[in-house]
Amino acid sequence: MKELFQYVPGQSLLHRLNPVTKLILTIMICAAAFITSSVFFLLGLLAVDLAIGLIAGVARKTLGILRGLMKIAVFLFVLQVLLSRQGTPVFWIITDRGLLTAATVVLRLVVVCMPLALVLAVTRVSDLSNALVQVLHVPYKYAFTLTTAIRFIPQFLEEMSDIMEAQTARGIAFDQARGLKKLGMMLPLCAPLLISSVRRTDQTAAAAEIRGFSLRTSASAFRRYPFHLEDALVLGFCVLLIAASILL
Amino acid sequence: MIQLDQVSFAYPSQGPTVRDLSFHIRKGEFVALLGANGAGKTTTVRLIDGLIRPTSGRVLIGGADTAGSSVSQRARRVGFLFQNPDRQICKNTVREEILFGLNAVRAEEGPEKLAARTDRVLADFGFTGDEEPFSLSRGQRQRVALASILAAEPEVLILDEPTTGLDYQECCHIMDRIRRMNREQQVTVIMVCHDMEVVLDYVDRALVMAGGRLLADGPVRQIFRDAALMERASILPPQMIDLSLRLDLPGADSPETMADAILAAKGGKPA
Amino acid sequence: MIDIQSFSFTYKNEAEPALRDVSISVPEGGFLGIIGPAGAGKTTLARAVCGIIPHHYPGDYYGRISVGGLDPVEASLTDLSRLVGLVFQDVDSQIISTMVEDEILYGLENFGIPHAEIPERIRLALAQAGIADLQDRTVASLSGGQRQKVAIASILALRPRVLVLDEPTGELDPVSSRQVFSLLKQLRKEHGVTVIVIEQKIMLLCEFAEQLAVLDHGAVLRQGPTREVLAHAEELLALGVNCPRVTTLSRLLSRRLGRELPVCVNLEEAEETARRLMT
């Protein structure tokens, strides 16, 4: 679980792209998914997501993310199908329109979530914040908040899995429970964890301050983030994607 | 009590691996796992408790393969004290904390018996029971975690660097209590520890690891006196052992015995 | 280099002061070890020297501190941080990057170190901390001990004139711990860096620190050259602070012989004392 949000070092096309390009690609895929209402186009977008994972050389991780999302997706699909009353029934209370809407909603969810996780897998968080500051002129304070938040997710999950391990070792049956039951067991443990995490964030801010946080300007970053031909190609692809989502 | 048969393990990505590990620990022994960072010590104790499963080989506790039961089922017999007590502590008072652990492993005894057990442990550790764990010091919290584990009276106690981050006094409290359990109730103890003075003071037998393999297995004093082994495993022996080797005064391993030996060699009368 | 005069500090919303009337001075290139039981105010003292107190953690303070001519209370945290480097006790809260290289890079970029100089600084800092091979790893893939070395390297790269380390070897094995202390010794010898270390590993501290300060309940109980402080071993033990076994040995020998032998702080001295007695 915790590995899902971690950076995977590499030299693929996706790794080399400008972080801003990757961000735009993500946003455009999301936008296209919301503009379109065609199930087939959404399937096409899913194929794009999978292709991104494949090109980035993180196929195993991509499938892991997909598997994780599928669990939520199946749950949502069943819920949608059962709640939908429009259209002609095909079986029991299930209708054709219901099936179609459910498929659209669920596909949209998967298509939107995947690129977010994938971009984090192929982008160094510091590159993301540097590029935001250098290229988009986002104030560093906000970029730092964003990167700290991104870093917080895997850290929180790591702590959570350590805590569950310690609780299992003392006889709390985390290793026997599944699904909602496990979630119910986890919730009471979250509160103390959140408190300690917030305290830790405060210390992280101090750690950044004593290493010149407030001196940082858009010229500070050691690495530069110019746009290359491949960035232009990907941005072109984004335009096509949006156009197609409107037309199809 | 604990038996490892040709156990191997590798984490999927990075991390220390363990290769072809075999050893046997008898009931009532007090054993330390020694070795440098990354030698595979923590991996080994996690394998023993079943928190991770060996990729090959078997781990037996009390004759039963750990693959046959879950970690939480075994918790009644096997206690695990982690380096960081805060992963374990989740209740607002020390009494609730101890009861919470007991309820998980000895619920069948009924509330009265568990309350009695809790009172006994609280008295033994000198807690009133109303303390809030998170306002206690790190060493006190480690004692809360230990109390909560010992309340269930496990047969095996696994310790992963239990004294890290504690001051000397807190360290002695924890280790004295563990040794008492070991001596009086024949609890089998296996411990990962970087403080060789603590190991010398409390432990009977040492397993030395390097690069995921077992390098040596024997009585602690004998192990520490093997200079070539210490070098190979990147371990610095305790000061008194080192001194006794330099001065060629075998047998002197504490300041008291060392003073005796030095004065005897001088020809003076040891007191 | 560091001069603390009657400094007291109480954290906001706390009743008890964390530091009481503390006076400590460390000359340039000095090596001060701080010991004391849990809750004695050691971390607060480290924070005060580098200005995190009162800039980041507010509270009431009295007294005066001077670090390299700057007053941490008056000077900005940024000016101070050019002078003083602090290695945190909680390593995971100090590390702000996901890659080892980026963590070292962070402070260098902020302080405007010329870009041409940066790769060499990174290389040297990693080499000094003994983790040259970890440059391209993700922080998440490292062990606790490796992370601790990354935290140390990220401060070393900034080349501060004063280094404050709060239990820098908590996650390290004895050999790595010794390497860290040897490095500190080398830094003060070759570059005149002033070092303050808070440490529970008393054996190492006594071997490397030239001055010791014993803290208890926020107050300095005793301070002075390491050997002189260790001469009061009983007092330390009553506080719950251990002393090295060689020191206990020299004390025992003195008592049995009925005359004062020199206090031993390391193995070599103990060996010499013993040999002299045995021949």
Image (cartoon, coloured by chain):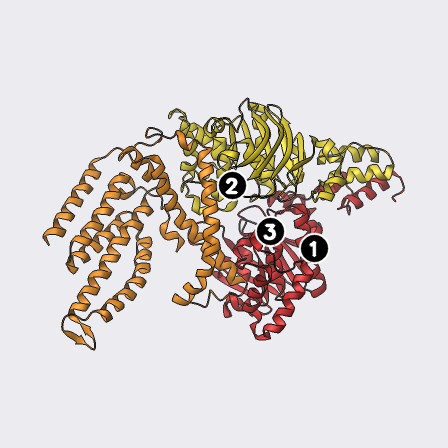
Chain colours: A orange, B red, C yellow
Above-or-below relation of A242 to C46: below
Is the C-beta separation of discs 2 and 3 under 8 Å? Answer: no
Judged left or right of residue A72, residue C238 is right
Q: Nearer the viewer, residue C199 or C181?
A: C199
Q: In whole angstroms, how far apart are the C-alphas of marks 1 and 3? A: 20 Å
* C-alpha span from label 1 to label 2: 29 Å
In the picture of the structure, the residue carrying the numbered disc 2 is: C148
| Residue B223 shows up from this direction | no
Residue type pointed to by label 3: Leu
Look at discs 1 and 3 and give the one toward the viewer: 3
Q: Is B200 left, or right, of A36 in this rendering?
A: right
Residue denoted by label 3: B136
Residue type beneath disc 1: Asp
- Percent position of residue B135, x then y: 57, 51
Disc 2 marks which amino acid? Gln
- The quarter in which the N terminus of chain B is drawn is bottom right
